[in-house]
Image (cartoon, grey):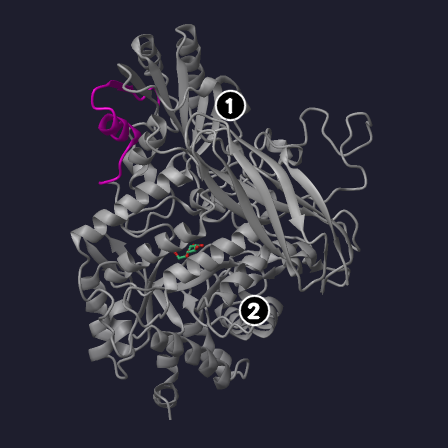
Amino acid sequence: MSRIQRLIRDMTLAEKLGQLTMTAAGYAVTGPVIAGDSTDGIKSGAIGNLLNLVGADHVHEMQRLAIEQSRLGIPLLVGLDVIHGHRTLFPIPLAEAGTFDPRLWELTASEAAAEAAADGLAMTFAPMLDVSRDPRWGRSAEGAGEDPWLGMQMAAAKVRGFQGASLAAPHTLAAVAKHFCGYGPVNAGREYASVDISERTLREVHLPPFEAAVAAGVVAVMPAFTDLAGIPLTAHVDLLRGWLRGRLGFDGVIISDYNAIAELIRHGVAADLTEAAVLALKAGVDIDMMSNAYRSGLPIALEHGLVSLADIDAAVHRVLALKENLGLFENPYGRGARAESAATLTRRRQLAREAGARAIVLMKNEADCLPLRADPARIAVIGPLADAPGEMRGPWWAAGVAAGHVSVLEGLRTALPHTDIVHAQGTDILGTDTGGIQAAVDLCDAADAIVLCVGEAAAMSGEAASRAHLDLPGQQRLLAQSVIERAHARGRHVIVVLFSGRPLILPWLFEEADAVLAAWFLGCEAGHAIADVVTGRVSPSGRTPVSWARALGQVPVFFGERPTGRPADPKDHFTSKYLDVPNDPLFAFGHGLTYGRFTLSNLRVSPPRVRESDDIQIKVDVLNEGAREAEETVFLFTRDRLASVARPLLELMGFAKITLRPRAQGTVTLNLAAAQLKFLGLNLQPVFEPGEVEILVGPCADRSRLLVHCIELMR
Ligand code: GLC
């Protein structure tokens, strides 16, 4: 008999339900504030898992209670939202997606896992895999942007990074693919709102990243808070038991979101905690995070025959198997056994700096005003986000404290020690105070260049942070326009560093500023990363993983739309367009300038006719006509103009990078398995349809900038 079988045989019902319960331990920098009855619950076996407890000593203290004082000595599983770093914060996922660098995605996850595991943690509630095309929704910040294929690459890289080669290794974390599924298109972009999308969109857009996570071996999945067409994901039998466990064969742990089981009552599908517990258990949810529904409802449900002991034992088995895979039985104190070296932390911060610089998207660079001329005499650094180290963390800062984060002001002062760098906040991020604007504007008079740092506060994106207006908050627009007006009157450039967890809607800023860097939220080394790009020490290579709308009225705007029967035609009034704005976004997915100047030519594709089992090779020549070395990202799209189902205008199928010195030329090769051109036919089953398909290659999802070549698919 295995250990797990023996434990299940010996466990009381209360101990079994304890393994299906995860309770929050209030985490504070000074130490744990164990919520409620957790310590008693741990000793009695009524609580088998914790979240939000950080610090090896604190985790080991709780672990010792479980191991030494509970009847069966089953180790605790302790988790935290390590979304983009633990204590050393990396760029937020949306920013990191823009590096289009799967190796980097995996590396930062691996580093975050090592740092969190050194703090005693064994699980992270990450990666977040929700595809988002609605910038009103604050959680766009946590994901990989608007495209499902990009989301699949990020999902696999993050699972590999967090979980490593073996979860028994004490520097790894169990990853949790969340929030399953279709959470991104919440109604009106409003957080937690209902979701109602087609089965086709669900399968073509929102499920693929989770499929990739399962294929990469993710050991846990978290259902979304939301309902999908009236069925809450926490109780969604078809998607949890049917698709995830049945179709994909996922046999890992499903862990509810925070209090989500109890919220089935507010969804209106459960009358009380007992009914909520039954629905969730029957749907396949194993761990109840924070709602206490399982501990309080399942005994009653069992008594009334609404669930079976076998249902409960199956869930317990999966939880114990995860703890066994994590090595928690053999080595419950392995995670956090020894502190990391100073050299490790230094190296990790250097990685955060490199990741930050690579995540920055140079959106505009009028007259090549960037990089700054060498050693300017005086720079004015203005705005509420210029000297705001804590804000650089972005949402979900886990154990990343504000202290130690590098602000733009600090980064520039370090990078330009001989430059007189003056600073004025001008206004604050959210407030109505305009009293400081004049002093900030006056700084422009004697400056050689102005760096204007504006945008959102860290807490204005992430969870529970939907926004109905996507302009600059507070009085920042007044500040920005006042500064730009004065600077231009003095013949000076204004370089805007824009911080946000989403693509803000700022057509006026992109029109009036001379240069704009989308800096998202870059983590602990933000200031150094921004200074590296602004001074030219690093050539910007980031590309936006989301489209930037011209107007909120365009939302959702994304490149993967279908053509409609009346595609926009300026010569035909009765076609799909607005009266007041163009259809295309202000910036297309993949947009990002560099300090080079790249042209693509000579696209060649072979073979010209392909069968499903063939591989397609795509080559394109790239020339850097600029004066500086730079890295170019080349995207591969396809367009299937004629099929049994209306196919998207563009589908992202790959990307590649090339770094070229000035006036150098190179060739980029992209490989595409013809099988990747399968799609869901009329019956939502994968089909490989013969016919012509366009292969498109270029710098972003703007068809006018893509080289096109047609191939023939054959049975
Ligand atoms: C939150 C989030 C989820 C997170 C969990 C634990 O409400 O929805 O993403 O992992 O609760 O903090």
Q: Is residue 612 visible?
A: yes
Residue ID at (31%, 12%)? 447
Residue tagged by mark 1? 510
Instruction: Check the image and name the residue furthest to the top.
Output: 489
Instruction: Check the image and name the residue furthest to the bottom.
Output: 1
Residue tagged by mark 2? 244
Total number of numbered labels?
2
User: Is residue 598 rendered to the left or right of residue 412?
Assistant: right
Q: Position of residue 556 (x, y in %)?
A: 62, 40
Residue ID at (65%, 53%)? 196
- Find the magenta span and give its range: 403-427
Q: State whether residue 118 is above or below residue 476.
A: below
Q: State whether residue 326 is above or below residue 266.
A: below
* Residue 81 among those drawn in magenta: no
Crowd class of label 1 (few under 14; some 14 to 19; many from 20; radius 10 Å): some
User: Is residue 78 rendered to the left or right of residue 274?
Assistant: left
Q: Amino acid at mark 1?
A: Phe
* Residue 404 among those drawn in magenta: yes
Q: CA distance from mark 2 to mark 1?
A: 43 Å
Q: Quadrant of the C terminus?
A: bottom right
Tell me the element at label 1: helix
Q: Is residue 523 visible?
A: no
Tell me the element at label 2: helix
For the residue pair 599 and 477, the one nearer the viewer reads as: 599
Q: Position of residue 80 (x, y in %)?
A: 34, 58
Q: State whether residue 45 is above or below residue 88.
A: below
Q: Amino acid at mark 2?
A: Leu
Q: State whether residue 553 is above or below residue 687.
A: above
Which of disc 1 and disc 2 is earlier in sequence? 2
Label 2 vs label 1, nearer the camera: 1
